[in-house]
Image (spheres, coloured by chain):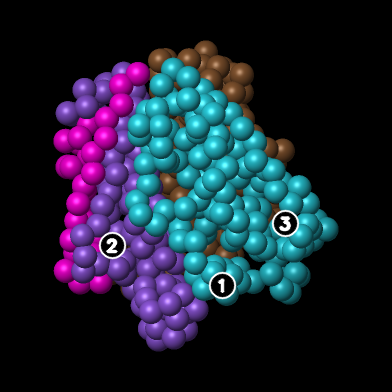
Chain colours: A cyan, B purple, C brown
Amino acid sequence: MKSFRRELWFEVPGRRALLNITPQVESALAESGVREGLVLVNAMHITASVFINDDESGLHADFETWLEGLAPHAPSTRYRHNRTGEDNADAHLKRQVMGREVVVAITAGRLDFGPWEQIFYGEFDGGRRKRVLVKIIGE
Amino acid sequence: MKSFRRELWFEVPGRRALLNITPQVESALAESGVREGLVLVNAMHITASVFINDDESGLHADFETWLEGLAPHAPSTRYRHNRTGEDNADAHLKRQVMGREVVVAITAGRLDFGPWEQIFYGEFDGGRRKRVLVKIIGE
Amino acid sequence: MKSFRRELWFEVPGRRALLNITPQVESALAESGVREGLVLVNAMHITASVFINDDESGLHADFETWLEGLAPHAPSTRYRHNRTGEDNADAHLKRQVMGREVVVAITAGRLDFGPWEQIFYGEFDGGRRKRVLVKIIGE
């Protein structure tokens, strides 16, 4: 069994953004030499997500509006967590809706994807350097 | 390490449905010959889910009502994504709540499940042929 | 390829609680002897979750309030599932938001975690003995 590990680093200037990281995951896969196996891609921070959906800007605007409705950022005082001096409780909740990780099949050396699947990093508390882990196992 | 791949195809006549696909996953597992490992089961479409919950029709009706409350289908114009000519933005959101994939342990050649766990395909934008991927790795 | 399996048992006295189970998962990993691979940690019950977030009591209170807003327990009659004699339909829904499972990379014999990642068992229908599965594969 082979294993391969890579960290991807991001710094989003604003509070929230969705970044298509499929090319970076494909590049790690190519370097790993794994032909059959699984790749785990996960946020290493608990106020960010990795998820698979569509690379369409209108949908990304819908995600923003929808998540803000489900777990509003303001007022900061609505959340107990923010009494610790943080203002990111909403980011912890949004991350649960969108998920921490994806596991993708590797077949014949490629990400085994349907026609529209793309991997995204979802940042909900940006303005600092944060990481995604890519871990590949297989043969 | 062995690996095994199967696509499961579905065509739901209406817009939404929940289908118990546990037998098809068990059948792929039996064919794979894997005794110890992991199986990944994921929707290959970004308006559908694979998830594990209860096979109880009342609960399925509750999921339908609940998801429609969290991410209503109508009016179609409430979503930016639908300006592209689609009417399925709600399906992209519902899929995030229910999840893209499950990973299940394989022990002694069986799905290592608790007493009520069943695997479902959640269709949120039906009326066409769509796929689920079953990928098995192990020994 | 090595594989290792352990069940973790819990009995939460009340209806809901969040328990940090990271030490138990680390202990299983140490016993497995796996240095490179993946660990799957999943609830074996469909009214409970395993998820990764912050071990901060204010945030846990926020999760409780937020989930109760998204999928209220009462009145029990609002859910079709509860006509079967159950009163836990809300727990099935809350579990979908929080997720069934996590998959964590194993690198150099350790859980490959970011600075604040901790694994939690989320109980949404307690008062009885319930299980989490830890399945480790690798080398």
Q: Are marks 3 and 2 in contact (CB under 8 Å)?
A: no
Q: What is the chain identity of the residue bearing mark 3?
A: A
Q: Residue sitting at 16 percent across and 69 percent down?
A: B13
Q: Which of the labelled discs sits on residue B123, or is there none?
A: 2
Residue to which mark 1 is pinned: A61
Q: Quadrant of residue C77?
A: bottom left
Q: What is the chain identity of the residue bearing mark 1?
A: A
Disc 3 marks a residue whose amino acid type is Val
Q: Residue sitting at 35 percent across and 54 percent down?
A: A115
Where residue B5 appears, x then y in whole percent?
27, 35
Q: CA distance from mark 2 to mark 1?
A: 23 Å
Q: Residue sitting at 40 percent across and 86 percent down?
A: B75
Disc 2 marks a residue whose amino acid type is Glu
- Packing grade of label 1 (10 A; few <14, some 14-19, many >=20) is some
Disc 1 marks a residue whose amino acid type is Ala
Q: Quadrant of residue A17?
A: bottom right
Residue to which mark 3 is pinned: A12
